[in-house]
Amino acid sequence: MKKSAVFQPKVDSNPDNMLFRFSLGQALFDEGKTQVCIPHLERCVQSRSDWMLPRILLGKALLANGESAHAKSRLKEALQLAIEQHHDDPAEELRSLLADL
């Protein structure tokens, strides 16, 4: 069973639970469904200004769908959060992604 099949019913029954929604977005991303995961990750990003992980995944999903300008904006936000929150490995990955844009 795909992970998205586990989280989709949870999101359906509790659409405002952002942890379920993030888990669904992440599962969809991991399954290669980058277009489908974008709205879920966008909702997560909008729910909290300090939540780095959905911004990283959203940026990667946007890149995969050819939306480089929007991706760059989200990846820059994620990098700023990584720096502020002292997440060195994600910051390094984000710098690399941004350098390629």
Image: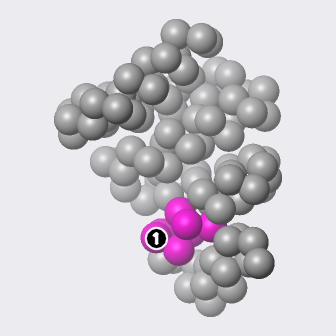
Residue at screen point 34% across, 32% down: 89
Q: Where is residue 1 in the image (x, y as percent from the top left)?
A: 77, 78
In the displayed structure image, the side of residue 42 where residue 12 appears, left or right: right
In the displayed structure image, the side of residue 21 where residue 83 appears, left or right: left
Q: Where is residue 95 in the image (x, y as percent from the top left)?
A: 43, 18
Q: Does the magenta stretch include residue 21?
A: yes
Residue at screen point 59% across, 43% down: 58
Residue placed most toward the observer, 32 or 69: 32
Q: In which quarter of the image is the C terminus?
A: top right
User: Given the current orientation, which residue lies at the most extreme front position?
Assistant: 1
Q: How many C-alpha atoms fall within 10 Å of the one at disc 1: few (<14), some, or many (≥20)?
A: few
- Asked whether residue 76 appears in the rendered view, the answer is no
In the displayed structure image, the side of residue 41 where residue 68 appears, left or right: right
Q: Is residue 98 magenta?
A: no
Amino acid residing under circle 1: Leu
User: Given the current orientation, which residue lies at the most extreme bottom position?
Assistant: 13
Residue at screen point 54% across, 20% down: 97
Residue at image mark 1: 19
Q: Position of residue 88 (x, y in %)?
A: 28, 30
- Tag 1 secondary structure: helix
Relative to 100, say whether 92 is above or below: below
In the image, the segment drawn in magenta is 18-24
